[in-house]
Image (cartoon, grey):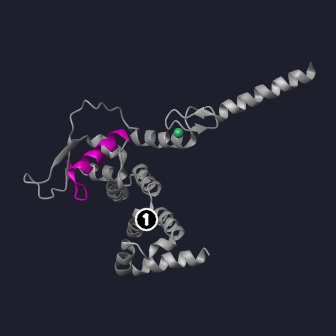
Amino acid sequence: MKMKLHVLEISSLFLFVFEHRNMKCMTCKGKYDGDAGACKQCYEDLKAKVALLTMPHQFSISFAPDLSLFACDDGHPDGPVQVSAHTVVLASRSPVFGAILDNGATEIHFYELMLGDLCDFVNYLYTAEICLDQKLARTLLGVAEKYQLHHLKDLCQKFLVSNLNWDNSLATYTFGHDRNDKQIIDAALKLITNNIEKLASSDEYAELKRSHPQLVIEIYERHFASL
Ligand SMILES: [Zn+2]
């Protein structure tokens, strides 16, 4: 009887551990250990989003927008295109916006953003959500650095690293160097050196030799160091 109880206790403990090892994250639907409702990665993402969206004062979105944001005009017949926003929202998102707007500015020009990118960016500032692609991630990484938007910078870096493949590896590697971004450089360099036998035959390689010969040296140095 004692033995039986013992087995029962162990099996229920096992079941408890098993259940808690197989919790489904409510956000990414992946399995995780624990019972917090979200995996560690999603919890950290959520925390960063809440930090970004936290406002210093009571604020109702029904207030009329009081700030004009302009995309680069790109030859638009009507000149630069305007998007409306709230000063209090932008000032709370970034210390750089805060400093600009403290000086009484009522408009901000984003010469690096086309209208579509600006709309995505403004939507991000209000929701902490953004749907990235290669081009947008690269553009917004620069914008995020310029305006000290750490959460956005992190999203862009993660997107570029997790979407690395052989076809975009040299372009991503060069981009990482242009931005002096160690995380992107290291991830791209690892993928390139793991496929070093394919390197010399790629079209991008010929272009890289011409445009960034020092990067070719870095690739081979890393490759030989790993042998
Ligand atoms: Zn998750």
* Residue at image mark 1: 169
* 171 part of magenta stretch: no
Q: Position of residue 7 (x, y in %)?
A: 85, 26
Position of residue 75 relative to residue 171, above or below, is: above
47 or 57, nearer to the observer: 47
Location of residue 15 (image quadrant): top right
What's under tag 1, amino acid-wise? Ser
- Outermost residue to the top: 1
Mark 1 Cα within 10 Å, few/some/many (few <14, many 20+)? many
- Outermost residue to the right: 2
- Image check: 209 left or right of 29? left
Q: Position of residue 140 (x, y in %)?
A: 34, 55
Which residue is rendered at x = 8% and y = 51% of the image?
78
Which residue is rendered at x = 47% and y = 80% of the image?
217
- SS type, badge 1: helix
Read off the magenta span: 106-128
* 108 part of magenta stretch: yes
